[in-house]
Image (cartoon, rainbow, N blue to C red):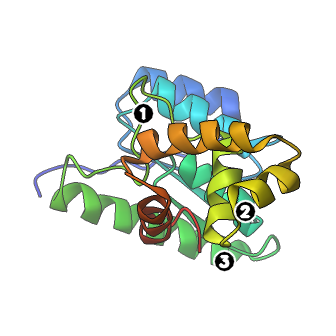
Amino acid sequence: MGQSLAIRTVDCAAALLVELRQRLVQTAVIDFKLAAPNPVIFAQNLRSRFPQTALFMCGDADPRIAAMVVAAGARGVLRAPAAGGDALLVAFTQAFQFACRAAAEAKDALPRQRPGRNGSLLSNRELEVLWAMCEGLTNAEIGQRLHVSEDTVKTHAKRMYNKLGARDRAQAVARAFRSGLVA
């Protein structure tokens, strides 16, 4: 495509930040271990500071954490066993190839989760409400599960609908399944 590709590796979060500040990085594939102790906050911070960089996380991660990382702004998660060094290398390669293909097909691809009016992504609590809705729970049942009032659930739901661009519960659930926020 007339573009030269440069692949760089770093071994710590500080080196990653230096690399991101020094040059335009189109794609970053980050091991969950590098994002410890909280990969969700790590992903949110990177996406807010470097929105031009497509972020992929990889490694051994719980499916719920993986979904939260995607909701926080990562383009995807490549799950690989903790002990599988070769599998992780394959995952890196697949992520990079996918990112290059996606960038070539559509420069302005829509993110999996739309920012709300204030540019924020779904909060952890909004994700919990969304997951519970996907399980078919009522607002009262969600409130009991999360130890909050039904009115609080409704508030989280309204904010979540706005951020997802959904009119109602059914549309929010459908978008969550289609976008991969829930499986």
- The front one of 78 and 66 is 66
- Work out whether mark 1 precedes mark 2 in sequence or the reverse, and give the earlier one: 2
Residue linked to disc 3: 86
**Residue 74 x/y as whole percent:** 51, 49
Residue linked to disc 2: 64
- The front one of 22 and 180 is 180
Work out whether residue 30 can be spotted.
no
Work out whether residue 51 can be spotted.
yes
Q: Are marks 2 and 3 in contact (CB under 8 Å)?
A: no
The 10 Å Cα crowd at callout 3, few under 14, some 14 to 19, many 20 or more, is few
- The front one of 5 and 139 is 139
The label nearer to you, 2 versus 3, is 2
- Work out whether mark 2 precedes mark 3 in sequence or the reverse, and give the earlier one: 2
Residue linked to disc 1: 116
132 relative position to 134: left or right: right
Residue at 63 percent of width and 30 percent of height: 15
39 relative position to 56: left or right: right
Query: Residue flagged by tag 3: what amino acid is it?
Result: Asp
Q: Which mark is residue 44?
A: none
The label nearer to you, 1 versus 3, is 1
Q: Quadrant of the N terminus?
A: bottom left
Query: Residue flagged by tag 2: what amino acid is it?
Result: Arg
The 10 Å Cα crowd at callout 1, few under 14, some 14 to 19, many 20 or more, is some
- Work out whether mark 1 precedes mark 3 in sequence or the reverse, and give the earlier one: 3
- The front one of 69 and 170 is 170
